[in-house]
């Protein structure tokens, strides 16, 4: 019997969860679905410039798990951009950050950070 999956810590949900080309009709049947934890790895590594190790600490998973999540997210993002598919961010096995208004204790929470990093 496989080990149960660990919940991935996510600081915030995306403000918008639907992206796509503006110059073609929307076809949800061919949409690419990115999970919230995949979105979080893209946000932390590419936008916030975290290393995979820092991202793993932030999400409370191993570095190799982050590497797998990140690779899957990049493939989905590329498929959406290159092939003009709608990108939907939804689902996944995640747990939202517990800190509410006191600042994130993990250091990467967009909700409580002022300005860019």
Image (cartoon, grey):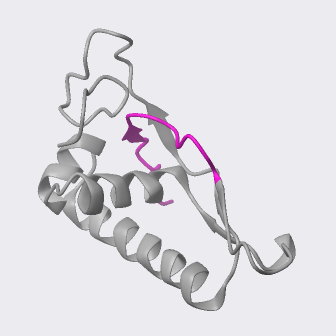
- Region of the chain picked out in magenta, as a range: 1-17
> Residue 108 occupies which quadrant of the picture?
top left
Q: How many numbered circles does the render carry? A: 0
Residue 24: give x, y in percent of width and height.
80, 81
Q: Within the magenta stretch, is there residue 74?
A: no
Please, which residue is most extreme toward the front here?
Answer: 23
Tell me if 45 is positioned left or right of 32 in this view.
left
Please, which residue is most extreme toward the top here?
Answer: 102
> Residue 87 occupies which quadrant of the picture?
bottom right
Compare residues 108 and 68 and report the one nearer the observer: 108
> Residue 71 occupies which quadrant of the picture?
bottom left
Q: What's the magenta bit mostly, secondary-structure-wise?
A: loop
Q: Is residue 26 above or below residue 17?
A: below
Q: Within the magenta stretch, is there residue 5?
A: yes
Compare residues 1 and 54 and report the one nearer the observer: 54
Tell me if 65 is positioned left or right of 87 in this view.
left
Tell me if 77 is positioned left or right of 32 in this view.
left
Residue that appears at 27% across and 63% down: 46
Quadrant (top left/top right/bottom left/bottom right) for the C terminus: top left
Residue 35: give x, y in percent of width and height.
56, 57
């Amino acid at each position: 019997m496989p080990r149960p999956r660990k919940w991935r810590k996510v600081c915030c949900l995306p403000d918008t969860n639907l992206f796509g080309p503006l110059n073609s009709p929307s076809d949800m049947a061919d949409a690419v679905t990115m999970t919230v934890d995949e979105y979080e790895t893209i946000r932390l590594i590419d936008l916030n410039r975290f290393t995979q190790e820092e991202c793993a600490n932030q999400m409370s998973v191993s570095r190799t798990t982050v590497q797998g999540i990140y690779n899957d997210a990049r493939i989905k993002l590329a498929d959406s951009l290159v092939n003009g598919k709608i990108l939907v961010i939804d689902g996944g096995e995640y747990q939202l950050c517990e800190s509410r208004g006191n600042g994130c204790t993990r250091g990467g929470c967009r909700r409580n950070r002022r300005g860019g990093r």
